[in-house]
Image (cartoon, rainbow, N blue to C red):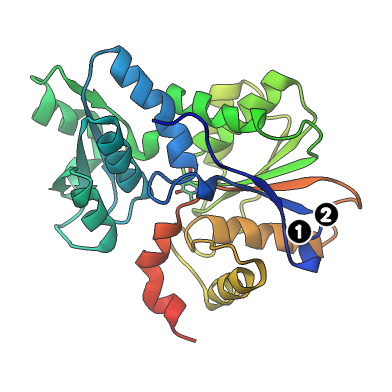
């Protein structure tokens, strides 16, 4: 894969966000999008270094990670298999996976829970395969995500990201610690009861002193939305000319705007929002977004 990424740091357009800079990881690639590119970078390298030419991974039927893995494997000239949670369905995301040559194995929810068992059942005799956990969670992913910090200025006061598993956030905090920066990392869990993310991050970083977890912006849970969030998405996209997705980045930007309104930041503080990509997630909610 290319190692020179295109991910500019841009000023937000709308006057209400004049303190906000957006790190455009969504521009890295339309399919290996945002943090999924960061996570896969060292996973692919590790696979290559251990002579594996076939990634096996896991995701839901609208998983950004599955599409990203399929595309990244195709570009790297290696095979990919995706275990898909739930009954066989057809959608835009799985179509892209198939076009990039991924083999899909639909798996009932019970079997899906034990990923190592699934992997072993299908691939234990296949030494060319490489296990990649759901969402790409791994120590390789942490290294890739920590590199985002190297591309940012050192004097950021507040850095924001959305979290599903918390791997990206852990990598960012690790990067902040490695460089000895004073930046506070603000993390928006997109699922209900997101406080487990703190433990997840602590596992990789050993300290959560510079972490600020905001657990009240999940809008009902993973992939859940409310009319308020849908309205917010439409307004934001029209104001900024930047697409955001309803599952992850919309909840993060909503949180930032809400905190701005509440006066949570001092004048002159430098705030960066990491746009983690995931724009294909719009496809999973096109009916809601199309309606007025
Ligand atoms: C997968 C994804 C995330 C979540 O990343 P984690 O490392 O699992 O916390 C955030 N944003 C977008 C757009 C994603 O696709």
Quadrant that contains the N terminus? top left
Task: Give the secondary structure at mark 1.
Answer: helix
Could you tell me which residue is drawn at 52 percent across and 31 percent down?
4
Query: Does residue 19 appear to the left or right of 200 in the view shown?
Result: right
Residue 43: numbered disc: none
The front one of 189 and 66 is 66
The numbered mark at residue 259 is 1
Residue 98 vs residue 40: left or right?
A: left
Label 1, label 2: how many angstroms apart (C-alpha)?
Answer: 5 Å
Q: Please give the name of the residue rendered at 49% of the width and 61% of the height, measured from the top-left corner.
A: 245
Q: Residues within 10 Å of mark 1 (few under 14, many from 20)?
A: few
Which residue in the structure is indicated by mark 2?
264
Q: Kindly indicate the quadrant of the structure image that contains residue 131.
A: top left
Quick check: is the Cβ at mark 2 less than 8 Å away from ligand 1? no
Instruction: Give how far across and how far down residue 5 sits, in percent.
Output: 53, 36
> What residue occupies the far bottom of the structure in this picture?
292
User: In this picture, is 231 found above or below 175?
Assistant: below
């Amino acid at each position: 894969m290319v190692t020179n990424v295109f991910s500019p740091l841009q000023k937000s357009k709308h006057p209400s966000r004049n303190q906000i800079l957006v790190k455009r990881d969504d521009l890295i690639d339309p399919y290996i999008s945002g943090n999924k590119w960061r996570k896969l970078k060292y996973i692919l390298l590790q696979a290559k270094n251990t002579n594996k030419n076939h990634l096996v991974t896991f995701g839901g039927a609208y998983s950004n990670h599955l599409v990203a893995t399929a595309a990244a494997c195709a570009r790297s000239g290696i095979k990919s298999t995706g275990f898909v949670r739930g009954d066989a369905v057809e959608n835009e995301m799985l179509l892209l996976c198939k076009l990039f040559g991924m083999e899909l194995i639909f798996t009932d929810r019970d079997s899906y829970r034990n990923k190592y068992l699934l992997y072993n059942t299908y691939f234990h005799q296949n030494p060319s395969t490489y296990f990649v956990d759901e969402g790409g969670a791994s120590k390789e992913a942490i290294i890739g995500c920590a590199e985002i910090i190297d591309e940012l200025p050192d004097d950021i006061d507040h850095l924001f990201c959305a979290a599903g598993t918390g791997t990206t956030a852990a990598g960012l905090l690790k990067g902040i610690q490695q460089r000895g920066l004073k930046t506070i990392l603000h993390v928006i869990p997109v699922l209900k009861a997101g406080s487990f993310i703190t433990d997840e991050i602590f596992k990789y970083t050993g300290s959560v002193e510079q972490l600020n977890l905001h657990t009240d912006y999940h809008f009902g849970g993973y992939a859940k939305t409310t009319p308020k969030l849908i309205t917010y998405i439409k307004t934001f996209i029209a104001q900024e000319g930047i697409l955001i997705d309803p599952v992850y980045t919309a909840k993060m930007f909503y949180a930032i705007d809400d905190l701005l309104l509440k006066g949570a930041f001092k004048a002159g503080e430098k705030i960066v929002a990491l746009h983690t990509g995931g724009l294909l997630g719009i496809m999973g909610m096109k009916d809601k977004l199309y309606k007025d």
